[in-house]
Amino acid sequence: MAPWRASSWTRKLTHTMPDTLPPDSVGLVTPQTAHFDTPLALAGGKTLDDYTLVYETYGQLNAERNNAVLICHALSGHHHAAGFHSMEDRKPGWWDAYIGPGKAIDTNRFFVVSLNNLGGCHGSTGPCATNPETRRAWGPEFPVMTVSDWVHSQARLADRLGIERFAAVVGGSLGGMQVLQWTMAYPERIANAVVIAATPRLSAQNIAFNEVARQAIRSDPDFHDGWYTEHGTVPKRGLKLARMIGHITYLSEHSMGAKFGRDLRTDQLNFGYDVEFQVESYLRHQGDTFSTSFDANTYLLMTKALDYFDPAAAHGGDLAAALAPAQCPFLVISFTTDWRFAPPRSRELVEALMRADKAVSYASIDSPHGHDAFLLPHPRYEAVFGGFMRRVARDLMLEETA
């Protein structure tokens, strides 16, 4: 079934249950699978002979096939960006606040494609998949991915869906890096770029955070050099610590203070090493949940892709030169309390785009929520993001009537 017909079915089903699903939701969605048997040469020198990508679509592809929007996910993201998988599982997609009828990415106007990247652990080919040569799980032998590898595979998915050019490619954090790579690798196939809470390269401090998280995983006795599935184990302790470390960097001091302060779980200190402060309980809960839902080898792979991304390196450190191939307008958004990918990193990108004579709009959003702000509802953020996407939609209408 063509993806836009599946989305039409979803809308009909949603219409029959107006009291149970939000009116601005894309409704019930079913993940789809695309298998590719054309080898994909990777930046690291290896080749994937065949692979599978899992994706979801929302909205309808128009007759001109020019209203498609690609969503690029962040480190722990996946294909389920909006809507619901079932009436029983009422957890919405990770960017449901911004994808749907009347939302910033309006599915009444756009056909939205969201996929799980190669190396992921939510259905696309990755360390948990079977290596056809060895007939065992890829495990630690799965090739290290780069942002450019992901973009090449996304372009092939676009070909499969009959999309020659995206109306916009959109992403936050690691997803924003993929958007930048699209503008450089396939400038003729992207009409607009939205880069949110991202950076053109990691700082030494960010690389250090990633390395501590990787070492937490690799030093777990249940890791078994990445072959934990064959030992019937999961490096939960390492994954838990990695997530706790990462989660601290995604929040701001203000948001943690406002939410937890120095509140105790009980009315007094216990003078021990068990959980006493509410923030300790919160972090442990986040770590426990993540350790049962995410693959350790995928976490290592994703953080390495973050570390490696540095398009200016091939141009003597000149980011403007790296961005020279880009042809589309950019929207760049940062958040004031994001200290993981701080506003100066976004301004560095904006200045490079200006030096390269590219059209760019920039907004620094005053938010207390740190790096996670790009995932959360915020009036000013919604106004800036939505305004840009409405302009994209208006441009499409002009093209259709020309």
Image (spheres, rainbow, N blue to C red):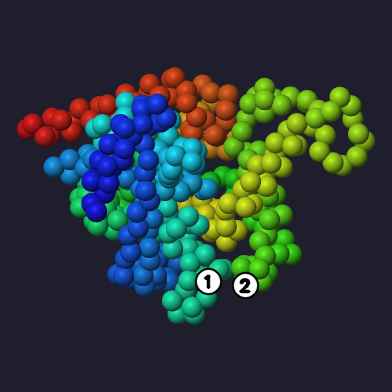
- Residue matched to label 1: 137
On the image, the x and y values in percent for residue 384 come to 37, 24
- Residue matched to label 2: 230
Q: Amino acid at mark 1?
A: Ala
Q: Is residue 243 visible?
A: yes
Assess disc 2: are there few (<14), some (14-19) or many (≥20) residues with their C-alpha within 10 Å of its C-alpha: few
Assess disc 1: are there few (<14), some (14-19) or many (≥20) residues with their C-alpha within 10 Å of its C-alpha: some
Q: Residue at x 74, y 37 (%)?
A: 281
CA distance separating discs 2 and 1: 8 Å
Picture quadrant where residue 34 is located: bottom left
Q: Are marks 2 and 1 in contact (CB under 8 Å)?
A: yes
Left or right side of 285 for 71: left
Left or right side of 382 for 235: right
On the image, the x and y values in percent for residue 245 come to 67, 44
Left or right side of 366 for 357: left
Q: Amino acid at mark 2?
A: Glu
Q: Residue furthest left?
A: 402
Q: Residue furthest right?
A: 271
Sooner in the amino-acid sequence: mark 2 or mark 1: 1
Above or below: residue 155 compared with residue 97: below
Q: Of 203 and 212, which appears nearest the observer? A: 212
Left or right side of 106 for 259: right
Q: Dot 1: what SS?
A: strand
